Image (cartoon, rainbow, N blue to C red):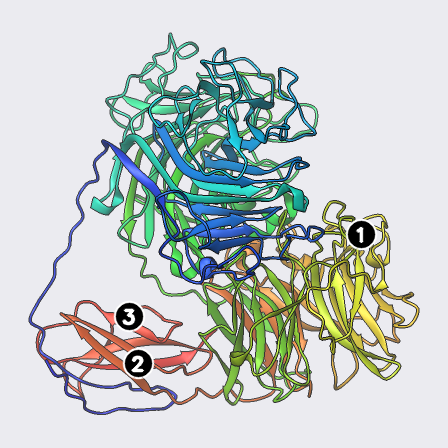
């Protein structure tokens, strides 16, 4: 049916493309209850043949576009730089020059020191059947090779390896004293990590054990340069596995122990090559499958409810001897501590009847005792909706302080798991804890704690205090709703009676702006203090009952920003500001293109999903983000700078073992060039491998322009050394290995000594003196951050700020080209626990007036529950840059609970919304999809009316994007308009 067009308007309140049609179909939807059922589910089925761009020979360095997929994530990708076969960060490749017998055309190649993951939607079950084909190619001198892992998480446990298998290593021996490695006849033994003894339930050898052929008593093996078909069947209940080679009916080895005694849902498969030199060769992987047997739920058919009725229950007389786990779709983990080498303790989680405690309803509930690890997890794969709503009833005792140090224990915790930045092994995305794990006077016996990303990042397991409490030993109702679009969640107590908001717009326990696909819930005892507090059985029991998990459509509108910006009045350096949200992205470094002094270039700081994007000025005081990245598939790009000829130089600060560092560049025009790898890894390999460059800047010395690269961990194996590397921006040489040209060479200064001994975060040029100026974070509790100016000839420092100067957690740094003053951001005021009294700030000082700080900008926490620092601005490391003409300053905000990161741009112009133009109207059935051009840093709402001059009612939530689909268009005629208002 043709859709007649009427009028189209532009302007501050854009009236977009009014039109009408006659709807002929109405769709009604409803939810039905989800049911548990026994089945076999395929989690992975991957032969790599659907991807293009494969390398055609071993010498072909092509890397196919695997990093654009959700299934395959190349997280460890640093081929050993001292290896002739190393390809910098191209150690994982899609190839078509070899594949498993009967399969074509593609497979995966791993060179030394590389790995990739296969993500999956977790389902906890009884037996995991893992099949794959593998070829291992080594020389006779090889001392290591492949590493194969099934990862698991749930019930307050993340990143565990359920099954960990490797080729034998020459430097190790198995329990029988048989050396690993390749023997003279080209046979490579296979070893499995045994963290416990499944047969006896006693502490195991906690070592690598050679898998033996049960019948012949000889090791299972890998023949060099020969494809073989492998199957591993893991019994998740008995914690054992059987191993098959080529014969998929008869195993060569049975009753081998799984690697960890915990039994949690598998969330990823990891294939790796642990080689450290060329003789360790390469590994090929093809035709991977993973299935699981069990009883599953599926939220695609509706909500799931659990009251723990119908299970075998323990009574008051047998709770210390029975093991009445809930079973069914629940996966239970019970050991006397975390990680490997633990005893089983099968009475930590039990379904109990009313003789143990009065349940919330019915006659049974679930009990948790004694501390970690005791918990149950439930996985549902994908729901029909993006968000979920979880309601549960809990009865939790007050936390008891340890007598020696007055540290309270967390007695109980609810955790939710999701995909984080395209990965399923991110850990607990949301964690709600009962009882404060902290030291008096801050500790509380009845605190309710919530996750905060920055608190977790800087303080280990510390969580944010919600300033709300639970009533000890009393059944209470809680409800948590996710908001994937806004990267946040809400937590309410007593939602069915007298609601109390505990957390509003809480930030996920994730480092990334891209969190989606919630898939698993866990309830657990979370205390580590069972020994301190009196040994097993000391921690009093906690209970949970009447759990409901349901698909949910979150329609709430965005809250105002959680801070008020001060310092933009008439007498300030800048009189206005613009907030530009980048949905689903984590802002890293920022820069301004010197060719027009208006275009902002910034990095998206994410693992593998990292990118470089730009924001273009579209009107007075107004910028719009170009949705098409300039560069994609990067690993934690931390900072960047733009040369006068338009070349973008950037560094990737991979803060995780084995990931990419180094220096890259993209020449102008950006859309016609590809990224060049100038320095894959700073420092002399292998002593200074896996650097962590965090910021960079141009400077002039003796009339020559140089590029300075600040490295806050020049040696990953020893995180103390720091360095300032010097690079010639005119170089034409790529892949510069063993790079060692430095103004300040890697040093071994103590972590809290002056200079580069701290965690350095930012560097800038000081044109007035010809120096370089750096900022380093302090120890998080005291005013001892360090700002130093460095002589660019001798590399000697001049200290501008030391202990007691007032800068605690330094972040970004830059020099105002108009005044010559040094501006720095103070991140301590953003992230320090219970910092409701500490306002995040940006200060400035003149380089000749040491310690005379002036507060230029402050970010007063205007939200309720001021002690939640995740509600406030999170100033980005290295994320602060002036335009070259000094007309504006842009800073990055990593507080992700507004749907993503933000660019906050300070200037002295009036804000004008750019003209908006309709670009697309597409009708599908009764749905109408609208699309329009960007109005800049604005939010939108879509309104609809039955007549062109009638009353328009808002039908959409507040939108940051330029698309919306009206899924319930009415019969008859309808007219639309879109209103644009500035983002807050």
- Residue 666: give its label: none
Query: Compared with residue 264, is residue 726 higher up or lower down, i.e. above or below?
Result: below
Q: Against 524, is 346 above or below?
A: above
Image-based side of 724 in relation to 203, left or right: right
For the residue pair 767 and 687, the one nearer the viewer reads as: 687
The mark that comes first in sequence, 1 or 2, is 1
Q: Quadrant of the N terminus?
A: bottom left
Q: Are marks 3 and 1 in contact (CB under 8 Å)?
A: no
Residue 471 visible in image = yes
Q: In the image as oriented, which residue stretches furthest toward the top? A: 317
> Could you say which quadrant of the image residue 808 lies in?
bottom right
Callout 1 secondary element: loop
Looking at the image, tell me whether mark 3 or mark 1 is earlier in sequence order: 1
Query: Which label is found at residue 978?
Result: 2
Percent position of residue 403, x then y: 67, 23
Judge by depth and name the residue closer to the eye, 897 or 752.
Answer: 752
- The residue carrying mark 3 is 956
């Amino acid at each position: 049916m043709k859709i007649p067009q009427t009028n189209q308007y532009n302007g501050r309140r854009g009236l977009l493309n009014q039109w009408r049609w006659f709807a002929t179909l109405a769709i009604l939807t409803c939810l039905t209850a989800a049911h548990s059922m026994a089945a076999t589910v395929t989690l992975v089925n991957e032969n790599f043949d659907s991807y293009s761009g494969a390398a055609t020979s071993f010498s072909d360095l092509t890397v196919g576009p695997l990093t654009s997929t959700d299934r395959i994530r190349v997280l460890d990708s640093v081929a050993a730089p001292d290896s002739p076969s190393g390809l910098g960060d191209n150690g994982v490749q899609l190839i078509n020059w070899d594949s498993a017998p009967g399969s074509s055309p593609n497979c995966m190649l791993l060179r030394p020191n590389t790995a990739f993951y296969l993500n999956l939607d977790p389902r906890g079950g009884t037996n995991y059947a893992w099949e794959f084909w593998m070829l291992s190619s080594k020389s006779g001198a090889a001392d290591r090779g492949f590493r194969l892992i099934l990862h698991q998480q749930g019930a307050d446990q993340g990143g565990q390896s359920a099954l960990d298998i490797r080729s034998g290593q020459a430097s190790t021996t198995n329990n029988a004293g048989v050396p690993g490695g390749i023997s003279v006849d080209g046979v490579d033994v296979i070893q499995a990590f045994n963290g416990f003894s499944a047969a006896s339930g006693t502490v195991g050898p906690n070592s690598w054990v050679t898998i033996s052929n049960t019948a012949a008593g000889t090791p299972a093996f890998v023949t060099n340069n020969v494809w073989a078909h492998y199957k591993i069947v893991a019994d998740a209940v008995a914690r054992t596995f059987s191993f098959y080679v080529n014969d998929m009916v008869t195993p060569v080895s049975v009753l081998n122990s799984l690697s960890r005694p915990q039994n949690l849902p598998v969330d990823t498969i990891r294939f790796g090559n642990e080689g450290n030199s060329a003789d360790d060769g390469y590994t090929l992987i093809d035709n991977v499958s993973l299935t699981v047997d069990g009883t599953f739920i599926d939220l695609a058919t509706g909500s799931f409810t659990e009251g723990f009725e119908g299970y075998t229950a323990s009574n008051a007389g047998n709770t210390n001897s029975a093991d009445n786990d809930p079973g069914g779709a629940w996966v239970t983990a019970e050991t006397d501590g975390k990680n490997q080498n633990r005893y089983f303790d099968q009475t930590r989680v039990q379904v109990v009847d009313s003789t143990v405690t009065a349940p919330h309803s019915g006659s049974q509930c679930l009990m948790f005792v004694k501390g970690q690890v005791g918990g149950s997890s439930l996985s549902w794969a994908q729901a029909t909706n993006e968000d979920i709503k979880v309601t549960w009833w809990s009865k939790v005792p007050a936390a008891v302080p340890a007598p020696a140090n007055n540290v309270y224990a967390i007695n109980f915790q609810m955790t939710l798991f999701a995909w984080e930045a395209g990965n399923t092994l991110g850990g607990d995305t949301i964690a709600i804890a009962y009882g404060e794990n902290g030291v008096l006077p801050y500790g509380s016996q009845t605190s309710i704690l919530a996750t905060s990303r920055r608190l977790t990042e800087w303080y280990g397991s510390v969580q944010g205090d919600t300033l709300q409490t639970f009533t000890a030993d009393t059944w209470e109702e809680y409800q948590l709703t996710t908001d994937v679009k806004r990267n946040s969640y809400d937590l309410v107590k007593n939602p069915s009676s007298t609601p109390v908001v505990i957390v509003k717009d809480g930030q996920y326990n994730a480092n990334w702006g891209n969190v989606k696909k919630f898939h698993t819930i866990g309830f657990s005892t979370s205390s580590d203090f069972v020994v301190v507090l009196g040994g097993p059985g000391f921690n009093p029991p906690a209970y949970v009952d009447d759990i409901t998990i349901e698909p949910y459509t979150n329609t709430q509108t965005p809250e105002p920003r959680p801070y008020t910006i001060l310092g933009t009045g008439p007498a300030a350096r800048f009189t206005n500001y613009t907030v530009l949200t980048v949905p689903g992205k984590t802002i890293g470094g920022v820069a301004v293109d010197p060719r027009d002094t208006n275009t902002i270039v910034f990095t998206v700081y994410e693992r593998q999903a990292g990118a470089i994007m730009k924001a273009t000025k579209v009107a007075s005081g107004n910028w719009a983000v170009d949705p098409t990245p300039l560069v994609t598939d990067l690993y934690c790009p931390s900072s960047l700078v733009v040369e006068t000829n338009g070349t973008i130089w950037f560094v990737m600060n991979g803060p995780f073992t084995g990931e990419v560092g180094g220096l890259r560049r993209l020449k102008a025009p950006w859309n016609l060039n590809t990224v060049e790898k100038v320095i894959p890894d700073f420092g002399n390999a292998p002593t200074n491998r896996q650097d962590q460059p965090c910021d960079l800047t141009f400077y002039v010395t003796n009339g020559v322009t140089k590029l300075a690269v600040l490295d806050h961990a020049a040696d990953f194996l020893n995180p103390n050394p720091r360095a300032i590397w010097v690079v010639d921006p005119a170089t034409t040489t790529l892949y510069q290995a063993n790079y060692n040209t430095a103004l300040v060479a890697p040093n071994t200064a103590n972590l809290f000594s002056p200079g580069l001994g701290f965690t350095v975060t930012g560097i800038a040029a000081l044109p007035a003196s010809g120096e370089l100026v750096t900022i380093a974070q302090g120890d998080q509790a005291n005013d001892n951050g360090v700002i130093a100016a460095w002589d660019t000839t001798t590399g000697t420092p001049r200290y501008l700020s030391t202990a007691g100067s007032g800068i605690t957690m330094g972040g970004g740094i830059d020099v105002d080209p108009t005044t010559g003053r040094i501006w720095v951001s103070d991140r301590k005021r953003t992230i320090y626990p219970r910092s409701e009294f500490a306002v995040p700030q940006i200060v400035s000082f003149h380089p000749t007036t040491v310690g005379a700080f002036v507060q230029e900008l402050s970010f007063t926490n205007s939200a309720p529950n001021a002690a939640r620092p995740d509600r406030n601005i999170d100033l980005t490391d290295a994320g602060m840059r002036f335009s070259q003409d000094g007309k504006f300053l842009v800073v990055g905000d990593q507080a992700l609970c507004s749907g993503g990161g933000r660019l906050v741009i300070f200037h002295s112009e009036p804000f004008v919304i750019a003209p908006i133009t309709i670009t697309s109207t597409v009708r599908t059935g009764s749905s109408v999809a609208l699309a329009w051009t960007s109005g800049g840093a604005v939010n939108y709402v879509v309104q609809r009316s039955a007549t062109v001059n009638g009353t328009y009612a808002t039908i959409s939530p507040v939108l940051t994007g330029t698309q919306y689909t009206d899924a319930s268009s009415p019969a008859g005629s309808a007219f639309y308009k879109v209103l644009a208002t500035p983002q807050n």
